[in-house]
Amino acid sequence: MRASAYLGDLGGLTRHRRLHALDLRGTGDSALPADPATYRCDRQVDDVEAFRAHLGLDRVDLLAHSAGCDLALLYAVRHPRRVRTLTMVAGRARALGVDFTPEHRAEGAALRKAEPWFEGAHDAYTRLWDGTATETDEDTALPFFYGRWDAAAEAHAASGAEQYNDEAAERYAGPGAFRPAEARAVVAAWDTRVLLVAGELDSGPLPRVAAAVADLFPRAELAVLPGAGHFPWLDAPDALRETVAGFLGRAADRHDGGATATVIARVLAEHRGRGFGGELYARGLEQARALGARVIETVVLAANEDGLRFALRHGFAETERYVLPGESAEWIDLRLG
């Protein structure tokens, strides 16, 4: 497993959303566990829940990458009311009984035959999946994981040496980690909106395999990013950013036809930091609910960073940014999930 720093800012997604990244056990700033058996995926679900509670968020838009998607799925199955949306980027789905086969890997590798590095890397890549790879093979096969093997990709790959925990990876999907039949039964009844993002050139998952995973959810979307490999924020940052931001915006727009109320808590600068904003917001929200509002919105001046943090912390999601005619200030509309 790898420290969350490898995700960067997910292709600039921070322009649209506030990101909170969790270092899994034994990676990044998280400590090594006393019991290595707790590296197993299902035993880290409580860590995710503790992180959510620490942030003070009632519900979250959960995004995971690669093997992290197994943990995200297990968390969402165990805590469905805490997950507003689920985004799976180049995601595994062993938690649902779907895995990637050597045949999938070979099919994806064949897409790269025109690459100048293909002949020198193909045998090494094949050995990754038949269990005979050496450390040299692991390094040699790296170009297959990127849509472009350029300086940025090489630097990203090189950073893995300091970010990776081999033992955590080996134990993560150990026996007993997943109960696919139970998980499938839960997600089949979900109302949660799910986005799956696949790279056109990725072998894990192939786009068609990602489509099969999407079919397991009642409300799923699939986006295949042209030219992207396993790390689309490097290969297609604009496409990834706009795809995810657009999905989250549409999810925030969803409501069931009930009345809409706008709740705004404004506190003069000299009185901030004393809890008045929280009290005003709680009273406004209570009044809105009493009046029958089922959709709660707010609006924040983009320059008001404290106000925006307050809204995001209380579960609001951005739906629109705009400038009023004749003005230069940017405003942000948000909706409570």
Image: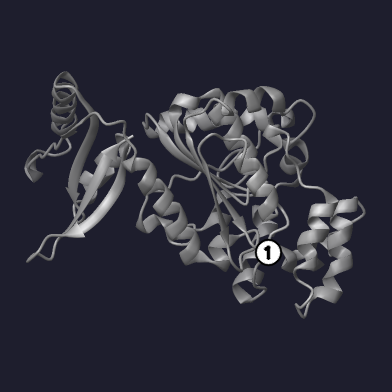
Please state the horizontal and vertical placement of residue 329, each as a whole percent of the image. Answer: 14, 61
Structural crowding at the residue carrying mark 1, measured as other residues with C-alpha within 10 Å and reported as few (<14), some (14–19) or many (≥20): many
Question: What quarter of the picture does the C terminus occupy?
Answer: top left
| Any part of residue 164 in sight | no
Please state the horizontal and vertical placement of residue 32, each as a whole percent of the image. Answer: 65, 37
Q: Quadrant of residue 271?
A: top left
Residue under label 1: 201
Q: Quadrant of residue 179?
A: top right
Please name the amino acid that badge 1 sits on: Leu
Residue at 17% in and 37% down: 273
Image side of residue 36 versus residue 254, left or right: right
Image vertical order of residue 269 relative to residue 183, above or below: below
Image side of residue 61 versus residue 286, left or right: right
Please state the horizontal and vertical placement of residue 310, each as a whole percent of the image. Answer: 25, 40
Residue at 79% in and 53% down: 104
Residue at 73% in and 68% down: 143
Image side of residue 171 versus residue 60, left or right: right
Q: Nearer the viewer, residue 6 or 217?
A: 217
Please state the horizontal and vertical placement of residue 135, each as a whole percent of the image. Answer: 84, 59
Name the residue at the right extreme. Answer: 132
